[in-house]
């Protein structure tokens, strides 16, 4: 019975049920399922800035996008007849005046040419045929037929006319013909006094028309394109204006509407009313900008693909806050957290209790995640949360608590600028961090602890594979934070927001840290819009076995680097062998060990030429296997090993095994990687093993933090200047003061107060 109820509930909330019963899509991610789409092109989209002609470039771009979606049923509601007619009539009037002026020029009569006020209905009558001819020409390029349909209010108020209109549109769609619909502005009643711009079509009519048609034709989606990005809670451009990503019917009271568009009379208020009317009729609505040259080329594509473009209207408001609201909550609590002593938060008795709970609570949830479906072995290794992992995790959290002593607000530099004028450079949190991680539930408490210790607010976006474990671990983290009134500082993002959408929150998020596959990191680096990304795209780690290497050390280090945890980013992916080692007992022992460990060997081009047997050839020397596989290649010496790593490596972690100190130092100095080791396993490249307690990730960037990033890597600095009425004028040629710029001691005393040595 419970299973049946669950299935029935899922069916009731499914998009297929919603569409049959006239309920709009609840989430952007469902918009790609829309079968019938109405695209409304407002006057501000189709007209130029001078309102005397058509914006042909943008119109052609939108036409090409509509063609891309002709596998769906597309209906266009367009403005522009008045603007096109106005352009034609002005041209004709000016031409006529110039002819008359030429005839009278012989009499010495010269009159300044002027254009009379053009009546909107006359402009519409002159422009409708030209507007349609342009649409036909544009769609003909794609071998697509169009049809013009002119309507008035009577076509909707009269039942017979409404049925005829519906029947006509249905037949056009059935024949894959794109209906181009416009109000018949040649016969509409004149506008009320002072309610319209002279000679310009009313946007309000086409907003209402698009909404009416969308409901009448049972359209799944209405895309209303205008000259605004979407809906704001107050007029765009004002200091407090905030863009509304998703608008719910109950939010109407929170909107302050501003001035109307440069054309038309409706403005945003008319758009919202039309959108809500369509939404109530079962059609999803998105209001977006169709005039921005940077986005116009793909605005319709992005909307239908579910990307965060424009304002999406939804009837179903989620129970929890939006991701934007979560970020703002995190920032507010993060600022409070930064003002506290992190050590107090980390070392509270309740925090110790949380660490103890960590050793038992997540295990059932972890087992449930592991049993949820068939997963690759590498994924299972990342996903599993064993007791051994939890023990190491607890130790790491205690290390972070120790390292958190007075790290925020620490003075790193003091300068006496002048007498009575002292400058300090002080460590401060970066702000709001977004950490996106895949299938590594132990990442959550590690990153949370580092954020608390560094005073940063945190947004966490975990993979669905570990959803249950992440939920338990997040609740344990909140227990520690709630004691200090900063519970909101760490937020778990569990909405349907796509990673690409999160990366667009450049005004809310200060740093993105991806932890997962190289594909995830690369996707985030491409998607991040104005937000710095800390991380590494790949973990192609090398171990170079020199001619002077000790065989016992080689076997131990290579086995540990490759086989201890092959799914880790610091695991060896390529083994470089000095040419002199080939066909020696050491080489045989290396191969035998790898075979016993069931490591699949892929040969590099040079190595393959030395072999009598034929292992599979490496598809690329730049491959991160993430499993019991590795590439084996031959080099002539340390210099060639360094050059090979620079060419094919990822600047993550690289190792040399040799007893020759001079060779080792050459490798350590010349190799440009975040971590460079001598006679140790590559697996030491880890925040916990470095004594940092944990890491938010390993960075291969050359700006800010590099290598395993712990607390220090999550801090930046600010400058604090203390004076006593000083001004720059005091230091001018005629001033009374001179600069000293004396360096002062920065040693902190035991109480955390500034003190001199």
Image (cartoon, rainbow, N blue to C red):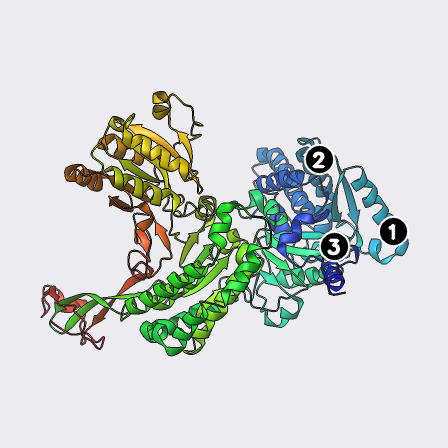
**Above-or-below relation of 659 to 400:** above
Which residue is found at the position 62% from the left and 66% from the top? 318
**How many discs appear?**
3
| Element type where label 1 sits in the image | helix
Disc on res. 163: 1
Q: Nearer the viewer, residue 342 or 442?
A: 442
**Figure quadrant of residue 490:** bottom left
| Quarter in which the C terminus is drawn | bottom left
| Element type where label 2 sits in the image | helix
Q: Work out how far the residue at label 3 is from the one at label 1, CA to CA, in angstroms.
A: 16 Å
The disc, 3 or 2, on the residue closer to the chain's N-terminal end is 2
| Quarter in which the N terminus is drawn | bottom right
Spot occupied by residue 74 in the image (x, y as percentages of width and height):
72, 44
Q: Residue tagged by mark 2?
A: 136
Left/right of residue 473 with respect to residue 748 in the rendered view: right
Crowding near the residue tagged with mark 3, few <14, some 14–19, many ≥20 C-alpha atoms within 10 Å: many
Left/right of residue 218 with respect to residue 28 in the rendered view: right
Spot occupied by residue 656 in the image (x, y as percentages of width and height):
25, 39
Crowding near the residue tagged with mark 2, few <14, some 14–19, many ≥20 C-alpha atoms within 10 Å: some
**Above-or-below relation of 730 to 608:** below
Q: Residue tagged by mark 3?
A: 209
**Above-or-below relation of 506 to 399:** above
Spot occupied by residue 24 in the image (x, y as percentages of width and height):
71, 58
């Amino acid at each position: 019975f419970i299973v049946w109820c669950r299935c029935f509930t899922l069916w009731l909330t499914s998009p297929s049920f919603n569409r049959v019963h006239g309920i709009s899509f609840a989430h952007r991610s469902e918009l790609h399922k829309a079968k019938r789409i109405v695209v409304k092109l407002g006057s501000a989209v189709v007209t130029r800035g001078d309102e005397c002609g058509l914006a042909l470039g943008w119109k052609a771009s939108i036409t090409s996008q509509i063609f891309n979606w002709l596998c769906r049923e597309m209906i266009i509601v367009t403005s522009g007849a008045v603007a096109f007619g106005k352009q034609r009539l002005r041209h004709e009037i000016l031409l006529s005046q110039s002819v008359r002026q030429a005839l009278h020029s012989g009499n010495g009569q010269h009159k300044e040419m002027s254009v009379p006020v053009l009546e909107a209905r006359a402009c519409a009558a002159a422009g409708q045929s030209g507007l349609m001819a342009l649409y036909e020409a544009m769609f003909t390029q794609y071998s697509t037929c169009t049809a013009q349909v002119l309507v008035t209010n009577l076509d909707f108020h009269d039942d017979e006319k409404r049925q005829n209109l519906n029947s006509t549109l249905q037949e056009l769609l059935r024949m894959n013909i794109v209906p181009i619909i416009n109000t018949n502005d040649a016969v509409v009643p004149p506008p009320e006094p002072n309610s319209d711009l002279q000679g310009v079509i009313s946007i309000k009519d086409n907003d209402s028309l698009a909404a009416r048609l969308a409901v009448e034709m049972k359209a799944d989606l209405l895309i209303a394109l205008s000259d605004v990005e979407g809906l704001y809670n107050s007029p765009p451009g004002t200091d407090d204006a905030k863009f509304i990503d998703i608008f719910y019917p109950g939010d109407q009271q929170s909107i302050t509407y501003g001035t109307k568009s440069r054309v038309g009379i409706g403005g945003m208020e008319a758009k919202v009313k039309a959108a809500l009317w369509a939404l109530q009729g079962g059609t999803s609505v998105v209001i977006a900008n169709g005039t921005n040259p940077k986005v116009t080329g793909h605005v319709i594509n992005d909307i239908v693909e579910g990307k965060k473009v424009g304002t999406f209207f939804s009837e179903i408001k989620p129970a929890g806050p939006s991701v934007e609201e979560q970020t703002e909550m995190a920032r507010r609590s993060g600022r409070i957290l930064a003002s506290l002593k992190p050590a107090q938060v980390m070392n509270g008795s309740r925090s110790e209790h949380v660490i103890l709970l960590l050793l038992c609570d997540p295990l059932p949830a972890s087992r449930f995640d592991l049993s949820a479906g068939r997963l690759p072995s590498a994924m299972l290794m990342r996903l599993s949360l064993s007791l051994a992992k939890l023990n190491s995790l607890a130790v790491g959290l205690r290390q972070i608590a120790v390292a958190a002593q007075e790290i925020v607000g620490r003075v790193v530099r003091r300068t006496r600028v002048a007498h009575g004028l002292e400058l300090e450079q002080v460590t401060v949190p970066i702000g709001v961090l977004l950490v996106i991680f895949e299938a590594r539930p132990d990442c959550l408490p590690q990153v949370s602890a580092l954020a608390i210790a560094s005073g940063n607010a945190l947004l966490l976006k975990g993979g669905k594979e570990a959803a249950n474990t992440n939920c338990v671990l997040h609740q344990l983290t909140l227990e520690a934070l709630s004691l200090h009134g900063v519970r909101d500082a760490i937020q778990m993002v569990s909405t349907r927001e796509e990673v690409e959408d999160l990366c667009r929150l450049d005004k809310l998020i200060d740093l993105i840290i991806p932890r997962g596959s190289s594909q995830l990191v690369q996707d985030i680096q491409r998607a991040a819009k104005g937000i710095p990304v800390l991380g590494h795209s790949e973990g192609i780690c090398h171990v170079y076995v020199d001619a002077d290497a000790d065989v016992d050390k080689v076997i131990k280090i290579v086995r540990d680097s490759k086989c201890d945890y092959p799914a880790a980013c610091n695991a060896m992916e390529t083994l470089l062998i000095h040419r002199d080692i080939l066909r020696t007992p050491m080489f045989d022992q290396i191969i035998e060990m790898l075979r016993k460990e069931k490591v699949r060997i892929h040969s590099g081009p040079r190595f393959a030429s030395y072999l009598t047997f034929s292992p599979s050839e490496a598809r690329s020397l730049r491959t991160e296997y993430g499993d019991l596989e590795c590439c084996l290649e031959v080099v002539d010496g340390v210099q060639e090993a360094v050059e090979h790593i620079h060419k094919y490596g990822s600047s993550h972690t690289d190792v040399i095994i040799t007893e020759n100190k001079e060779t080792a130092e050459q490798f350590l100095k010349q190799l440009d990687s975040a971590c460079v080791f001598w006679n140790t396993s590559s697996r030491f490249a880890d925040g916990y093993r470095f004594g940092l307690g944990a890491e938010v990730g390993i960075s291969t960037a050359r700006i800010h933090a590099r290598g395993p990033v712990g607390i220090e890597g999550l801090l930046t600095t600010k400058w604090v200047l203390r004076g006593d009425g000083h001004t720059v004028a005091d230091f001018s040629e005629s001033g009374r003061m001179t600069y000293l710029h004396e360096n002062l001691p920065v040693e902190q005393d035991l109480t955390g107060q500034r003190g001199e040595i």
